[in-house]
Image (spheres, rainbow, N blue to C red):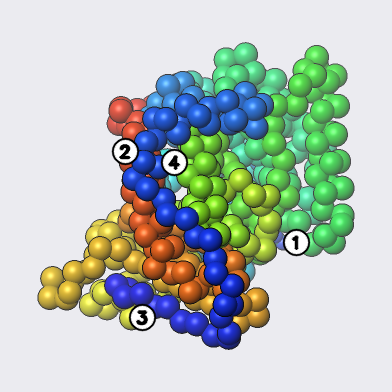
Amino acid sequence: MSADSSTETGSRSSRPLPVRFLTPASLNLHRVFEQNEQRVQKRSGGKIPDPTRPATKGKPRLLLMGQRRSGKSSISSVVFHKLPPNETLFLESTARIQKDSLNSFMEFQVWDFPGQIDIFENPAYSFDLDAIFSEVGALIWVVDSQDDFSEATHRLSMVVLNLRRDYPHINIEVFVHKVDALAEDYRQDIVRDVRMQIADELGDNGVEELNMRFHATSIYDHSIFQAFSKVIQQLIPRLGQLEAMLTNLCRSCRFEKAYLFDVNTKIYIATDSTPEDMASYEICSDYVDVIIDFTEVYGSWPRSQQWRERLEGEPWMQPLENQVACEWAESTMVLSDAQRPVMLREVDRFLAIVAIMKEGSYDKMPQINMNVDVAVKGLTEFFEITKPKDSQEVVNPVLQG
Ligand SMILES: Nc1nc2c(ncn2[C@@H]2O[C@H](COP(=O)(O)OP(=O)(O)OP(=O)(O)O)[C@@H](O)[C@H]2O)c(=O)[nH]1
């Protein structure tokens, strides 16, 4: 879609909005980097992803591990291949490690491990641990919350004990999964139980610090995308600077909330510093869906194609040769219930800024668009600066029994 698809309903507020102009000076990223370094260290407890460390040297790898039928393949299929959640009922059990290379804003791989294989204990299999764990960005351990999870927590504890000496940098993320069957109030109780079981097991083995994060997830709502967003954000060097840019944009444009989305997966790779809430993520994520559906029907392509195919080919808003050239995609819509405009602006072929604006700010769209232009330039420069120098894939053969 090349044109602005702005629509507006309801009355506009006459109250003038103090929309500030961002200037190109805001693009002095090196200065911004320095200013924010301390703040980021404080917020992340000193654990900033270091772009030079081995885990992110090549294509970062996400490992999906856990018990049989815990939902690993379903998660991968729903998040990265747009499989409708109901269709995961027909997925077959994974027999071998499934390696998926994803061509997204950042190149990374997802390895789906068969639940029945215990790579540390099963003598029938011989694994080159270095080939598996040396390039890992995060190990995602999936626990089925609808099942007895004592075996799952025990196996995770064994994995942690086996990995901590040789691969201490690996981020371990625990997805307490299938929480859709649990009442809202009960979900955090289950997460707490899982956490306590793991803490007890590790404590019995002399490990006091529980160096992992827990997420309540389900493929039937947005929680799985939110959890993956957190996982991916750990892999982004200088995430704090991205957040600072979005916070700056929110202040200058009076946005309530802004996200930088990977449109293909609907993972958000950064947001501003205001507290995160599921509702705003859902609105923005659904808006990405609307725009994608709309462009499939009315976009600049000769025929409707799958989004994935387009991403692998031309940029998402590439105009046809015989059409008037457009430089980017943008869209604004006013939600009829809350009178709050939502806007989307393409950053590059993979990324888009999606923001919820304050009521009445639609009147200020020209200034807002100019500020967003500056932010887009800043983001483009950010990714240029932080692009890994040596992003060539390191091929590590994995021995399978
Ligand atoms: N209710 C519910 N069911 C889920 C969810 N995620 C996955 N499932 C179901 O769990 C079952 C097993 O899912 P799989 O993705 O095949 O599990 P797996 O961990 O890959 O299993 P293995 O390949 O045997 O290791 C399927 O019937 C899915 O539909 C979820 O969030 N909620």
Q: Is residue 209 above or below residue 229?
A: above
What type is the residue that disc 1 sits on? Asp
Pick whichever of labels 3 and 1 is earlier in the sequence.
1
Residue at 72% over, 56% down: 178
Residue labelled 1 has its Cβ within 8 Å of some atom of ligand 1: yes
Quadrant assignment for ligand 1: bottom right
Q: Quadrant of residue 284?
A: bottom right
Q: Mark 2 points at which residue?
A: 384
Number of the label disc, if any, that sits on residue 297: 3
Between disc 3 and disc 4, the foreground one is 3
| Nearer the camera: disc 3 or disc 2 | 2
Secondary structure of residue under mark 1: helix
Q: How many marks?
A: 4
Query: Quick one: label 1 or label 4, which is nearer the N terminus?
Result: 4
Separation of marks 3 and 4 at Cα, in angstroms: 31 Å
Among the two numbered marks 1 and 2 on one chain, the one whose residue lies closer to the N terminus: 1
Quadrant location, the N terminus:
bottom left
User: In this image, 239 relative to 27: left or right?
Assistant: right
Numbered badge on residue 109: 4
